[in-house]
Amino acid sequence: MLPNRFVLSALFVAVGSLAVAAVVPLRSVQAPPAPVEQHKQLLSTVGNWEGTLTMFMPGMPSEPTPAKEKVEAIGAFWTQSHFECSFMGMPYHGTGFNGYDPVKKKHLGTWIDNMSPALAVMEGEMDANKKLVMRYEAPDMMTGAMTPHRIETVIGENAYTSTFFEGAGDGNKTMVIDMKRAAGRPVEAGTKGK
């Protein structure tokens, strides 16, 4: 009786293993994808930045506010931005992720901050003048209605300018962020780079 149980158990394990092997095909070992030129351009923004944020709102003065940003690399494909300034007299903290999808041939981004429950999901491209144009929908600051937004960013070796627009078509200019690279070494996400 005992040998029969042993044979039956062994047969059950063998049949089970074959069934699992049939359902879960063996994956071929593939090398991870290599970064493309757009990823290298993205990683050139890694580091610490200082500059100003200027709002353009009806009936309000357009005075630059000091701002700072730390951009970290997340491997070879993504960056994460940590941005801080004073926004309408209150502390503002935001974070975003940026990458490039070589299959879609699109730049990708997300943004969240401490002043909005909305998640901005962006998609865009580099135009002929080497200006990165990102588009997304977000609530209008005055009405709360979902509205088209656009960010046009010109990136130099040690400076960048992002101009924000809200509304359909050309839209209305709402904000400009002017930043210059600050002292400090590039940082990888999860490290304590200053």
Image (tube, grey):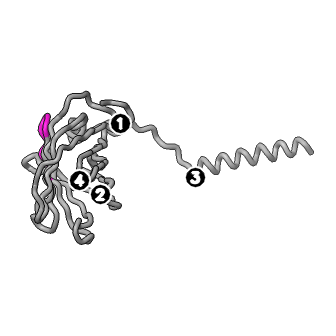
Indicate the secondary structure of the residue bearing disc 4.
loop
- 2 and 3 marks in contact (CB < 8 Å): no
Q: Which residue is mark 4?
A: 89
Q: Which residue is mark 1?
A: 189
* Between marks 1 and 3 in the image, the one whose residue lies nearer the viewer: 1
- Residue 23's label in the rendered image is 3
Quarter-of-image position of residue 169: bottom left
Quarter-of-image position of residue 52: top left
Indicate the secondary structure of the residue bearing disc 3.
helix
Separation of disc 2 and disc 1 at Cα?
Answer: 21 Å
Q: Is residue 28 left or right of residue 37?
A: right
Choose the circle earlier in sequence order: 2 or 4. Answer: 4
155 in the magenta segment: yes
Choose the circle earlier in sequence order: 4 or 3. Answer: 3
Q: Quadrant of the C terminus?
A: top left
* Between marks 2 and 4 in the image, the one whose residue lies nearer the viewer: 4
Indicate the secondary structure of the residue bearing disc 2.
strand
Choose the circle earlier in sequence order: 1 or 3. Answer: 3
